Image: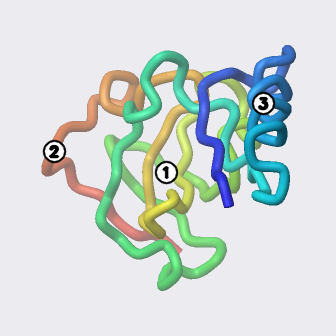
Amino acid sequence: MIVLFTDFGLHGPYTGQVKAVLHQMAPRVPAIDLFADAPVGNPKASAMTGLRAAILPPNAKLAAAGRLLERERTFSDRPLGAAFWYENSNGLAEIAVNQGRADRDLGLAIGSPVEIVS
């Protein structure tokens, strides 16, 4: 299985072009779209918490940087510039901003407190 995590966006041919080439090179290997709308030019601009997302209630919110953040499945589930949290590919709760940078846009840094609110 090939998992795609890109900043190509949801519009335009780019993800489709990548999947076409992957299909030519490995036709029996499925390609899964994890994200096509990661923060532009910087897919690591999110903030990993170290919290296992699987142990959090489905409706849990995270409080960080004076904001209450709702859980989303993908970046595109939130409006541009909106902050949220999601379960990343490591199974951890990660704070992100759609088309932004959680570190800069929310003022987060290593050691910033994060609180679970259910």
Residue 7 vs residue 60, the one in the foreground: 7
Residue at image point 38% right, 31% down: 45
Query: Mark 2 is on which residue type?
Result: Ile
Q: What secondary structure is found at the residue carrying circle 2?
A: loop
**Few, some or many C-alpha atoms within 10 Å of disc 3 (few <14, some 14-19, many ≥20)?**
few
Q: Earlier in the sequence, mark 2 or mark 1?
A: 1
Query: Mark 1 is on which residue type?
Result: Leu
- What is the CA distance from the residue labelled 2 to the residue labelled 1? 19 Å
Image label count: 3
Residue 99 vs residue 116, the one in the foreground: 99
The location of residue 103, given as percent across then percent down, is 31, 31
As drawn, 57 above or below 11: below
| Colour option used | rainbow
- What is the CA distance from the residue labelled 1 to the residue labelled 3? 41 Å
Residue at image point 39% right, 23% down: 105
Front tag of 1 and 3: 3
The location of residue 100, given as percent across then percent down, is 50, 22
Front tag of 3 and 2: 3
Front tag of 2 and 1: 2
Q: Is residue 69 left or right of residue 90?
A: right
Residue 77: mark in rendering:
none
Q: Give the residue number, with chain letter if any, for mark 1.
A: 68
Q: Give the residue number, with chain letter if any, for mark 2.
A: 110
**Few, some or many C-alpha atoms within 10 Å of disc 1 (few <14, some 14-19, many ≥20)?**
some
Q: Give the residue number, with chain letter if any, for mark 3.
A: 21
As drawn, 1 above or below 77: below
- What is the CA distance from the residue labelled 3 to the residue labelled 2? 38 Å
